[in-house]
Image: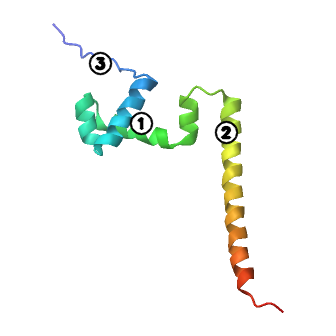
Amino acid sequence: MSITPHSPKRRKYDAAFRAEALRLVGESRSTQAAARALNLNPKLLYKWQKEAQTPIAAALGAGLDPATAAELRQLRALARRQAQELEILKKAIVIFSQTPDR
């Protein structure tokens, strides 16, 4: 009689469960404790945390179509660029306000 190892089926978790798990991680301040409470592998929670911090992955996880996700990336890049320009202008104002009048 031969024993064939069977592989356990991989469980799939919906977005609501993931969001609740991440909320629990945030409240407990310990991924290990939250993983034990949810009976999950801590590595899975770390992966979900990383995905939640990545805007593109979060957009794809939210079910956005590729065109909307691309537009979101462009808008975020534009916002970063405008924030940098604003910082430059703030520094220029400080520099020019310190020079003596002629």
95 relative to 101 in the view: left or right: left
Q: Position of residue 8 (x, y in %)?
A: 29, 18
Q: Which mark is on residue 98?
A: none
Callout 2 amino acid? Leu
Residue at the front extreme, as displayed: 101
Callout 1 amino acid? Trp
Quarter-of-image position of residue 12: top left
Residue at the right extreme, as displayed: 102
Q: For this rendering, which residue is in front, 90 or 35?
A: 90
| CA gap, disc 2 and disc 3 | 40 Å
Give the residue number, with chain letter if any, for mark 3.
7
Determine the secondary structure under disc 2: helix
Q: Residue at x 68, y 51 (%)?
A: 79
| CA gap, disc 2 and disc 1 | 21 Å
Determine the secondary structure under disc 1: helix
Q: Tell me the quarter of the image containing the N terminus.
A: top left
Determine the secondary structure under disc 3: loop
- Crowdedness near tag 3: few (<14), some (14–19) or many (≥20) residues, C-alpha within 10 Å: few
Whichever of labels 2 and 1 marks the residue nearer the N terminus, that label is 1
Instruction: Please say if 90 is above or below 13.
Output: below
Quarter-of-image position of residue 60: top right
Instruction: Please say if 58 is above or below 97.
Output: above
Q: Position of residue 14 (x, y in %)?
A: 43, 22
Single out the mark in the foreground, 2 or 1: 2
Residue at the left extreme, as displayed: 1
Q: Position of residue 27 (x, y in %)?
A: 32, 41
What scheme was used to colour the molecule? rainbow
Give the residue number, with chain letter if any, for mark 1.
48
| CA gap, disc 3 and disc 1 | 23 Å
Give the residue number, with chain letter if any, for mark 2.
72
Single out the mark in the foreground, 3 or 1: 1
